[in-house]
């Protein structure tokens, strides 16, 4: 088990312990102490557990943004299910008990206040469900974690991914339930890394099933023996252009299908070779051709190789924010359409 998995399991166990303390007070100790739930603050221990739960949630969010391997869909499913169970169990079991104790104390049903944990569960459940539906079937936010898609996308860009572009899939399992379209050559696509599906990658689709893709020493791409059109562009100017591998490097305009986009040639070795895309798979490359771990690498644990159709997540459509503080916030990126 990796340190990252131990960290997540530790957070989950701590969160469940805090929730247990809060629910025990709200369902067992609290009604005995205050039958209507309106007599004052919670006891000290559940209040401490509540503050600890907030800290755990903050750590989980930090982990989600810091490391790409955190499955946010799984977190939403777990938190939504937990909220729904708490709300449902309270309605079926514990609210009746609170009502009985309140009547014994001379109070009416209108005087009863639900425990704070139940109020939160009732409030958050529909919100979590809505976010899960939007994120699973419509649009999902994604943060660009590397330089591999420069100059199209920069490290630190936050983008929206159109989830319904290639089919509607269930959250967590990624099972296809309704085909809605097919990938086209040149699309910028987020996909699950085949060696580790918990990690999302983003690259440009170059090779379709059955294609023969070749890259020569001049960074020229050939598909089925025909060169992909390239028009020389200006010297790269942008974030990190003062670094050795990007200083003074060339760019080009490339035409892949209906997509005309910029690529760049960072200082460094060219990954050459020839590959035939298997049926049901796709071949991806980064726009930063000499600094991209993509389908040209086969068999590496941190490289995609050929990507199965089942691993496609969605089509990248727009940049909505960039807060990469190394170069200052790139406010001009907001609203940038991805081609």
Image (cartoon, grey):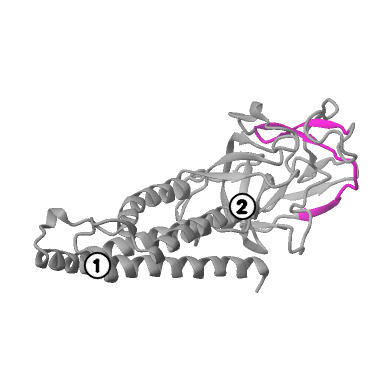
Q: Is residue 213 magenta?
A: no
Q: Residue at x 52, y 57 (%)?
A: 55
Q: Locate residue 254, reporting x and y percent.
A: 75, 33
Is residue 171 visible from the viewing direction of this image? no
Of labels 2 and 1, earlier in sequence is: 1
Q: Locate residue 177, reporting x and y percent.
A: 43, 56
The numbered mark at residue 95 is: none
Q: Residue at x 77, y 49 (%)?
A: 213
Q: Mark 1 and mark 2 in contact (Cβ < 8 Å)?
A: no
State whether residue 135 is above or below residue 105.
above
Q: Quadrant of the N terminus?
A: bottom right
Image side of residue 195 versus residue 139, left or right: right
Displayed quadrant of residue 10? bottom right
Is residue 160 visible from the viewing direction of this image? yes
Q: Considering the numbered disc 1 on the image, is that residue within a helix, a strand or a loop?
A: helix
Q: Locate residue 52, reporting x and y percent.
A: 49, 61
Q: Quadrant of the C terminus?
A: top right
The residue closer to the viewer here, 163 or 44, is 44
State whether residue 163 is above or below residue 259.
below
The residue closer to the viewer here, 318 or 107, is 107
Q: Residues within 10 Å of mark 1 (few under 14, many from 20)?
A: few
Q: Considering the numbered disc 2 on the image, is that residue within a helix, a strand or a loop?
A: strand
Q: Which residue is mark 1?
A: 33
Q: Residues within 10 Å of mark 2 (few under 14, many from 20)?
A: many
Q: Residue at x 50, y 68 (%)?
A: 14
Dot in front, 2 or 1? 1
Q: CA distance from mark 2 to mark 1?
A: 53 Å
State whether residue 259 is above or below residue 183.
above
Q: Which residue is mark 2?
A: 191
Q: Is residue 256 magenta?
A: yes
Provide the residue span drawn in magenta: 249-275
């Amino acid at each position: 088990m990796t340190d990252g998995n131990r960290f997540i399991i530790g957070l989950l166990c701590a969160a469940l312990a805090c929730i247990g303390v809060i629910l025990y007070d709200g369902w067992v100790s609290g009604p005995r102490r205050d039958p209507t739930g309106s007599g004052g603050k919670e006891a000290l221990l559940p209040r401490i557990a509540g503050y600890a739960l907030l800290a755990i949630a903050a750590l989980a969010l930090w982990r989600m943004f810091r490391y790409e391997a955190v499955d946010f869909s799984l977190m939403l499913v777990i938190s939504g299910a937990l909220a729904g169970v708490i709300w449902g169990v309270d309605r079926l079991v514990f609210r009746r008990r609170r009502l009985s104790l309140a009547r014994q104390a001379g109070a009416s049903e209108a005087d009863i206040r639900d425990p704070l944990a139940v109020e939160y569960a009732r409030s958050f459940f529909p919100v979590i469900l809505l976010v899960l539906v939007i994120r699973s079937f419509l649009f999902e936010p994604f943060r660009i974690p590397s330089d591999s898609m420069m100059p199209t996308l920069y490290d630190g860009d936050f983008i929206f991914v159109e989830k319904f572009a290639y089919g509607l899939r269930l959250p967590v399992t990624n099972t296809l339930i309704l085909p809605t379209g097919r990938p086209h050559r040149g699309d910028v696509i987020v996909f699950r890394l085949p060696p580790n599906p918990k990690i999302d990658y983003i690259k440009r689709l170059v090779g379709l099933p059955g294609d023969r893709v070749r890259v020569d020493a001049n960074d020229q791409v050939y598909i089925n023996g025909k060169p992909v059109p390239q028009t020389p562009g200006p010297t790269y100017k942008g974030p990190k252009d003062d670094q050795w591998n990007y200083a003074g490097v060339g760019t080009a305009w490339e035409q892949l299908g209906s997509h005309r986009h910029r690529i760049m040639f960072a200082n460094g070795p060219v990954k050459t070779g020839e590959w035939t895309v298997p049926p049901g798979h796709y071949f991806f490359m980064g726009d930063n051709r000499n600094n991209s771990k993509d389908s040209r690498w086969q068999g590496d644990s941190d490289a995609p190789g050929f990507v199965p159709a089942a691993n496609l997540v969605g089509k990248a459509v727009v940049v909505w924010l960039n807060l990469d503080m190394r170069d200052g916030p790139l406010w001009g990126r907001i609203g940038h359409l991805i081609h």
